[in-house]
Image (cartoon, rainbow, N blue to C red):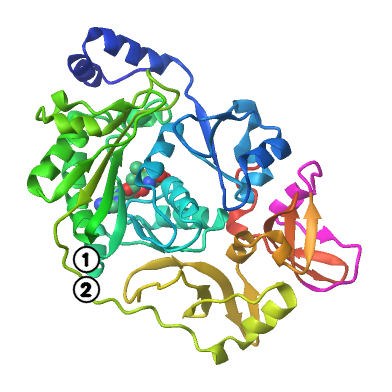
Amino acid sequence: MALPESFMKKMTALMGEDEARTFFATYEQDRALGLRVNPLKIEPEQLRALSGFHLQPIPFCSNGFYYQEEDAPGKHPYHQAGLYYIQEPSAMFVADTLAPQPGERVLDLCAAPGGKSTQLAARMKNSGLLIANEPYPKRAKALSENIERMGITNAVVTNEMPERLADYFPGYFDKVLVDAPCSGEGMFRKDPEAATYWSPAHVAECAALQEHILEDAYVMLRTEGTLVYSTCTFAPEEDERMIAALLKKHPDLELLPIEKYANVSDGRPQWADDEQSLTKTARLWPHLLRGEGHFVAKLRKHGSASSRKQKNAASAKENTLSDYRAFEEQTLCEKLAGSFHWLGRQLFLLPNACPDLGKLKVVRAGLHLGEQKKNRFEPNHALALALLSDLFQNQYALSASDQRWDSYLRGETLPLTHARKGWTVVTIDGYPLGWGKAAGGQLKNSYPKGLRRRGLK
Ligand SMILES: C[S@@+](CC[C@H](N)C(=O)[O-])C[C@H]1O[C@@H](n2cnc3c(N)ncnc32)[C@H](O)[C@@H]1O
């Protein structure tokens, strides 16, 4: 592929001719394709056995696998069931570096379309609070759909600028990820268009934006909290130099070592201020491993953090839940417990100890249970995707070898062989795909209109 000339000159000056030649040669090779198995729903061996995909472990990411183009996992109904997330292999290294634990408060500040958020939530085992934020509304919607598909229940998706969140959540988070908007040099193979709008000026603009975002992230970190900063670019201005400047500005930040294995490399201090501790940062290079370019830095904040007293979000009163409870009794095998919360007529089950979300623009608040209609409750798609199939009383079982799944995902009505009525979950080899409503010998299709046929044929 054609690379911008000034990019090639710059990389040659940085790397030296020999390394630059090997590096540029990767642009003539096919990129590696990756998917990450969703441990909230399935184990890798089960997926391999069920799907027949040609999966090979990605050595630098737990649950990450290379697949072959012919597997076409994006067109498979298991994708719609949230059994995996298709993700660039090197990008999978980042969330494991932050390593969030169940029960923690975690912020993913630049989160769309959700590769890293869904990986963080899986590591948190749906326990604790993940705020997944994206300032662009359309991208926030895509993020929210991916959170839903993967069956994540502990995430609040917000659509805010970082500075507004920083006013709201000073000193609040145990862990913060800034997967920054960047000049994308590491993705030229995946997204050749990115190479066409590359320029030195764009690198400088990105660096200026990243500096602001990092400042807001710093404010939101509690004392002894951990920050991970990542980009998918090679530009030192956005990588080592960004971290060198951040450390100078905030001497209470400590750069932490990142464990390097499987050809993940050290950052390059000689491209910044020669501060040797920058070797603790990590670089993933396409000529050294099977994946695109990435940079990752991990830091701890030792200084004090100002904080704001946070109220918890108000719980709905039980007497407002009667239609939901009637639906639950007829449809689910268990009563759901926790903090129920109304946003207008939409009912959510909030993550534990969810803060009051006040005037923030919230796209999703935990598990979206459904909508209050006149005298009845209608379930949301998210509820079907968040529970395991044995928690639903009525199931319509499909298999990947039976093309009726295609009709279902296209929004068609399915025939029934029994007279049972009511909300029914449609499954694919035992994994929920969505809702249907049984009546008059048919299963009416409730697969969301906006998702129909997406990624299919
Ligand atoms: C590298 S992408 C994030 C990818 C995502 N973390 C994932 O793994 O799927 C950077 C994101 O930052 C968003 N962004 C752009 N400007 C921003 C800003 N000022 N503050 C926060 N995020 C911003 C972009 O819209 C984009 O979705």
- Viewer-proximal residue among 246 and 381: 246
Which callout, 2 or 1, points at the residue further toward the start of the chain?
A: 1
Judge from the rendering whether residue 181 lies leftward or rightward of residue 240; answer left or right: right
Drawn side of residue 60 relative to residue 278, left or right: right
Residue type at mark 2 is Arg
- The outermost residue toward the bottom is 319
Residue wearing tag 1:
170
Residue at image x 26%, y 30%? 198
Q: Alpha-carbon neighbours of circle 1 within 10 Å: few (<14), some, or many (≥20)?
A: many
Looking at the rendered structure, the secondary structure element under dot 2 is: loop
Residue 457 visible to an observer of this rendering:
no
Residue sitting at x 51%, y 52%: 146
Q: Which residue is mark 2?
A: 308
Residue 306: give its label: none
Residue 312, percent from left and from top: 36, 78
Which three-letter amino acid code belongs to the residue tagged 1? Answer: Pro
Residue 141 falls inside the magenta stretch: no
- Identify whether 229 is placed above or below 151: above
Residue 443, percent across and down?
80, 64
Task: Tell me which residue sits at (66%, 45%) in the image.
Answer: 78
Give yes or no for contact between labels 2 and 1 (Cβ–Cβ under 8 Å): yes
Judge whether residue 404 is colored magenta: yes
**Relative to 407, residue 16 above or below:** above
Q: Main secondary structure of the magenta part?
A: loop
Residue stretch rendered in magenta on the structure:
399-422
Q: Position of residue 195 (x, y in %)?
A: 32, 27
The secondary structure type at the circle numbered 1 is loop
> In the image, is residue 388 above or below residue 400?
below
Image-based side of 85 in relation to 254, left or right: right
Q: CA distance from mark 2 to mark 1?
A: 6 Å
Q: Quadrant of the C terminus?
A: top right
